Image: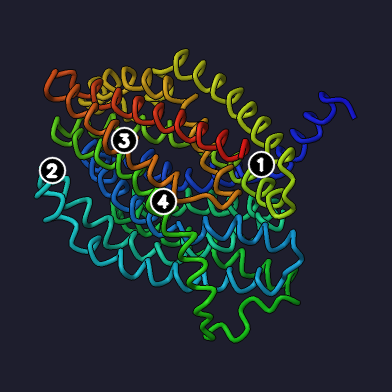
Amino acid sequence: MTQSRILKTEARSLLFLGIPLAGSQVAQFAVHTTDTLMLGWYSVIALAQVTLGAQVLFVAYIVASGFAFAILPMVAKASAEGDLIQVRRVTRMGLWLSTLAAGILFLPMWFAAPLLEAMGQDPLVAQGGQEYLRIAGFGLWPVLWGLVLRSYLSALEHTGIVLWVSLGVLVINAFVNYALIFGYWGFPEYGLKGAAIASVIAGALSFFGFVIYIQIYFSEQEMFARFWRTDWVTISVVSRMALPISATALAESGLFAASALMMGWLGHLELAAHGIVLQLAAMTFMVHMGLAQAGTVRVGKAFARQEWDAVRLTAKVSISLSTVFAIITMACFFGIPNFLIGIFLDHKDPFSVDILRIGTLLLIFAALFQLVDGAQVIALSILRGMQDTRSPMIIAAVSYWLIGLPVGYVLGFIYDFKEVGIWLGLVVGLLVAAVLLWARFVILVRN
């Protein structure tokens, strides 16, 4: 088989897995984007409040999701080895550990307002963020359970159901959001609380959708039978894999959460604009994430068989596909920034002009980190497929907290570049991470 034919075959395989995963990632994230979009129509203050609250919730979600992300390469490897008992064990214990993690993280979300005020946030915005979190935080359990089952299904290459469940939940969430935020169709007008309620409902629907599918198509695995039985050996194995993944994800999400806090120091208009641009950047990032998860599955199975040429091939094709999408995204961000920002705003609001001005400027920097953000998540997922998680954790901590965050603070507040300086710090942190993670991959495959 010629080299070009090999590349095309691998690209088809990756896209077969990656397109449904990317679509489901976009749909899942769009649930949160719907909150931002509709609350932007509702009021600027509500938009700032949900931006702050959603950042806290996202950090909690990312920290706890390490157990679900660990399931993906472990199930892929066990499946390639024909060990179906191990497939069931790691999935079950992933659900157990996710339950525990959600419980631990819920407590600080309940008392978020004083913590946010201590970090220099406007008391009105901090209080609204807490109101959002006290409801939306209950959705952390079903969301994390659904993420574990999603990883299980993805590793077994049943990605179609992941996409369809995510799309169905997105549509339902949009209607529930609209009804509860604005008080349409006979429902009370809950505003910010309505968005939080809708998010909890969306998480629960997604989880039950996956449960029903597994019970129908994988009934022979008895995934939920005798669920109370504890497997301490598997808990230990999953934890050793998951904790570095959680720490890595915390380093990156913590950088973005810190950027939201620094934006809050500048004012609620800057925070609202930051929230909009972050939604757009994160939405496009979900496509890279879907491709990256497909790469994890492909590499995980090749790694189980010790097929190093296949590992290199998947890495090459994954980064190529990610680069093509990044270029398309950059063209959109550079070409139609006013339109993209304007979607989130009520143009009758007197503050909308200022938010549009700040947001279109920030979108330029969001365009700049499309290439490096895609590159770092592809490299991270390839390494995860090779079950290398500790070195990426160290790389992430150094790149984001010792380089990206200080650069953002210095440029934003010492040199007074304000919101532009903060976003330049994000770009620098992601660039350093991408370079170091790919260097790590090259070292591993050479050895």
Q: Where is residue 424, by image quadrant?
A: top left
Q: What amino acid does circle 1 point to?
A: Gly
Q: Residue at x 71, y 37 (%)?
A: 15
Q: What amino acid does circle 3 point to?
A: Gly
257 over 325 or under it: above or below:
below
> Closer to the camera: disc 3 or disc 1?
1
Q: What amino acid does circle 2 point to?
A: Gln
N-terminal of the pair, mark 1 or mark 4, is: 1
Return the residue nearer the eye: 337 or 261. Answer: 261
> Closer to the camera: disc 2 or disc 1?
1
Which residue in the rendered view is the most extreme toward the right?
A: 1
Residue 218: % across, % down: 73, 70
N-terminal of the pair, mark 3 or mark 1, is: 1
Residue 106: % across, % down: 29, 65
Neighbourhood count class around disc 1 (C-alpha, 10 Å): few under 14, some 14–19, many 20 upward: many
**22 relative position to 333: left or right:** right
Q: Secondary structure at mark 3?
A: helix
Q: Residue at x 21, y 31 (%)?
A: 406
**Which quarter of the figure is the C terminus placed in?**
top right
Q: CA distance from mark 3 to mark 1?
A: 27 Å
Residue 326 visible = yes
Residue denoted by label 3 = 275
Residue denoted by label 4 = 177
Return the residue nearer the eye: 320 or 130. Answer: 320
Residue 23: % across, % down: 61, 42
Neighbourhood count class around disc 4 (C-alpha, 10 Å): few under 14, some 14–19, many 20 upward: many
Residue denoted by label 1 = 18
CB contact under 8 Å: marks 3 and 4:
no
Residue 378 visible = no
